């Protein structure tokens, strides 16, 4: 088993490589692969750069229960991906799948298009002339030159080093006249349903707070802050004895990290692994559920702007937290026997992620940087108050934010930040929200960290949307290369026509109104 790691830098070279391409696509997640494939099929030379060691991002790293909202919103290359996955299972299409199947589809795309991935490339510097990127320089000294660039990364590392405006965290409601941005205290889902004492010695505030509880409970509903929603690993579990691996004990296991969960179970609530969605071949996509689960709340706030080495420390902390959580539930004598028995029915799927002993290689980066442009997507677009007339793709999921911190309110443990707002139809994403201001960068398009408020990004941040925007970004770059123009000056109506001709859905379909997407309403117990 290889060690789990986010950051595996290439050694510095005395003779670094120099690469030339028409377009550089930064990161080989689902969005980046679709963008690179679109460009390659159009006959352009592409450099696909990946900081990690695997392809496919979260789609190939355990997120097999696709968050889509309404399938009618997706066409083009994104929809084809789900059809190609379905073909593996003998279906017309499949939106639930095993990780290795998604990875195999992506690898076939790359092989058929003759696209090589430059792995373990960590961005050190972006060189510009006036308002155009000329070259990317990596930590090991390798250089990538191109005419145009696409930032498909979950964090927005390329746009940041290119000097493009961005934000991190939650805007105040006042910034865009929203209601559900900023700090959120009033949403009951994924919060404590019983009283849980927050102090190390119960009833004694002088003993200090239990692990994972923030001392800072300041702020009011709707206030802005630097915090981002929690990350976790989307685990592929199984109850098949032929491939099930027992949950391992992490290297820095500390049962005290889970004292709040112990008390919560003692109070009568056992739901930490309820969001265990069924995948083919008796496997699961296991996500966060309830007040204390796989989300490592409050431990990721530094991630978006951290160095690669600093992210490695955060990554390892998440591995130890989540691996330790499973080991704790399966083995701790203080956990009721029925819970331990239930948890021990499950284990890591040994035929997935073979290099890392069944553990996913990618951390679920739900939110990183978000670009700021002259047109920002907000909750008003989701609710249909504003309409982007230059839409180049749709979002179709509920506005969804996981909790951002665990605090003490009224002498009890409380999670803050969860929002789940459905009840709206798919909405268009503006082309202007994926392009920087021209004065900041004229040859860059951003397919993931788009210009959106925190709460609007909660709908846009789903993997099918990333694939849609990857195709849209690539088509925009193709038009810019054809016209030798800044990406901001292409004919957007022509872009929309091209995308529609390729099968993309660029205008919201006329669908009957419906009430709320509630994927967490009726979880199947493990």
Image (cartoon, rainbow, N blue to C red):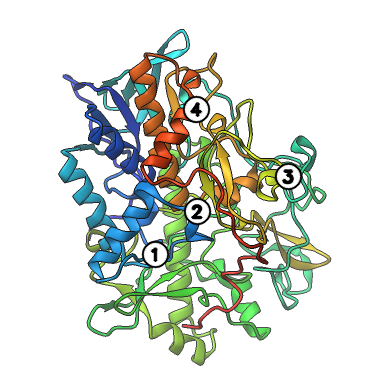
Q: Which residue is mark 4?
A: 492
Q: What element does badge 2 sit on?
A: helix
Q: CA distance from mark 3 to mark 1?
A: 30 Å
Dot 2 or dot 1, earlier in sequence: 2
Q: Nearer the viewer, residue 7 or 254?
A: 7
Q: Which residue is mark 2?
A: 73
Q: Position of residue 284 (x, y in %)?
A: 39, 73
Q: What element does badge 1 sit on?
A: loop
The N terminus sits in image quarter: bottom left
> Toward which corner of the image does residue 46 lie, by quadrant?
top left
Q: Position of residue 448 (x, y in %)?
A: 47, 40
* 168 sits to left or right of 136: right
Residue at horizontal 64 percent and vertical 82 percent from the top: 269
Q: Which residue is mark 1?
A: 95
Q: Are marks 4 and 2 in contact (CB under 8 Å)?
A: no
Q: Where 190 sits versus 195, above or below? A: above
Dot 3 or dot 2, earlier in sequence: 2
Q: CA distance from mark 2 to mark 1?
A: 14 Å
Q: Position of residue 497 (x, y in %)?
A: 44, 35
Q: Residues within 10 Å of mark 1 (few under 14, many from 20)?
A: some
Which-is-in-front pick, marks 1 and 4?
4
Q: CA distance from mark 4 to mark 3?
A: 22 Å
Which-is-in-front pick, marks 3 and 1?
3
Dot 3 or dot 1, earlier in sequence: 1
Dot 4 or dot 2, earlier in sequence: 2
């Amino acid at each position: 088993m290889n060690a789990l790691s986010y950051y595996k830098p290439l050694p510095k070279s005395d003779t670094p490589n120099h690469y030339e391409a028409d377009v550089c696509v930064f990161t080989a997640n689902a969005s980046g692969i679709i963008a690179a494939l679109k460009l390659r099929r159009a006959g352009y030379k592409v450099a696909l750069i990946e900081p990690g060691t695997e392809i496919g991002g979260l789609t190939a790293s355990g997120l097999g229960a696709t968050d889509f909202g309404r399938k009618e919103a997706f066409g083009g290359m994104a929809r084809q991906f789900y059809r190609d996955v379905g073909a593996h299972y003998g279906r017309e299409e499949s939106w639930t799948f095993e990780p290795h199947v998604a990875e195999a589809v992506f690898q076939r795309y790359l092989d058929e298009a003759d696209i090589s991935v430059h792995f373990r490339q960590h961005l050190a510097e972006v060189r510009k002339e006036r308002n155009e990127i000329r070259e990317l320089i990596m930590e090991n000294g390798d250089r990538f030159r191109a005419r145009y660039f696409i930032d498909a990364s979950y964090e927005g590392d390329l746009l940041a080093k290119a000097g493009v405006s961005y934000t991190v965290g939650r805007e105040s409601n006042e910034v865009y006249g929203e209601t559900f941005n900023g700090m959120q205290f009033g949403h009951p889902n994924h919060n404590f349903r019983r009283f849980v004492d927050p102090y190390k010695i119960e009833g004694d505030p002088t003993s200090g707070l239990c692990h994972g509880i923030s001392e800072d409970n300041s702020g009011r509903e709707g206030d802005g802050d630097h915090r981002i929603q929690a990350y976790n690993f989307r685990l592929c579990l199984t109850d098949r004895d032929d491939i099930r691996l027992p949950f391992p004990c992490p290297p820095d296991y500390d049962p005290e990290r889970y004292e709040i969960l112990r008390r919560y179970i003692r109070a009568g609530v056992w739901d930490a692994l309820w969001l265990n969605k069924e995948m083919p071949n008796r496997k699961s996509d296991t996500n966060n559920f309830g007040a204390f689960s796989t989300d490592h709340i409050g431990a990721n706030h530094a991630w978006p702007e951290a160095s690669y080495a600093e992210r490695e420390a955060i990554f390892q902390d998440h591995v130890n937290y989540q691996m330790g959580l499973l080991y704790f539930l399966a083995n701790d004598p203080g956990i009721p026997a029925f819970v331990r028995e239930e948890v021990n029915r499950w284990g890591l799927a040994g035929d997935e992620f073979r290099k890392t002993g069944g553990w996913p290689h990618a951390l679920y980066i739900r939110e990183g940087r978000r670009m700021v442009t002259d047109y920002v997507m907000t909750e008003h677009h989701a609710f249909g108050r504003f309409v982007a007339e230059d839409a180049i793709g749709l979002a179709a999921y509920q506005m969804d934010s996981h909790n951002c911190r665990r605090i003490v309110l009224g002498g009890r443990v409380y999670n803050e930040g969860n929002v789940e707002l459905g009840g709206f139809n798919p909405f268009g994403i503006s082309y202007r929200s994926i392009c920087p201001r021209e004065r900041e960068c004229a040859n860059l398009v951003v397919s993931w960290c788009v210009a959106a408020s925190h709460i609007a990004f909660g709908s846009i941040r789903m993997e099918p949307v990333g694939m849609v925007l990857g195709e849209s970004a690539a088509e925009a770059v193709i038009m810019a290369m054809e016209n030798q123009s800044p990406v901001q000056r292409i004919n957007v109506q022509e872009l929309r026509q091209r995308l529609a001709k390729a099968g993309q859905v660029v205008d919201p379909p006329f669908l009957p109104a419906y009430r709320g997407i509630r994927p967490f309403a009726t979880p199947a117990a493990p």
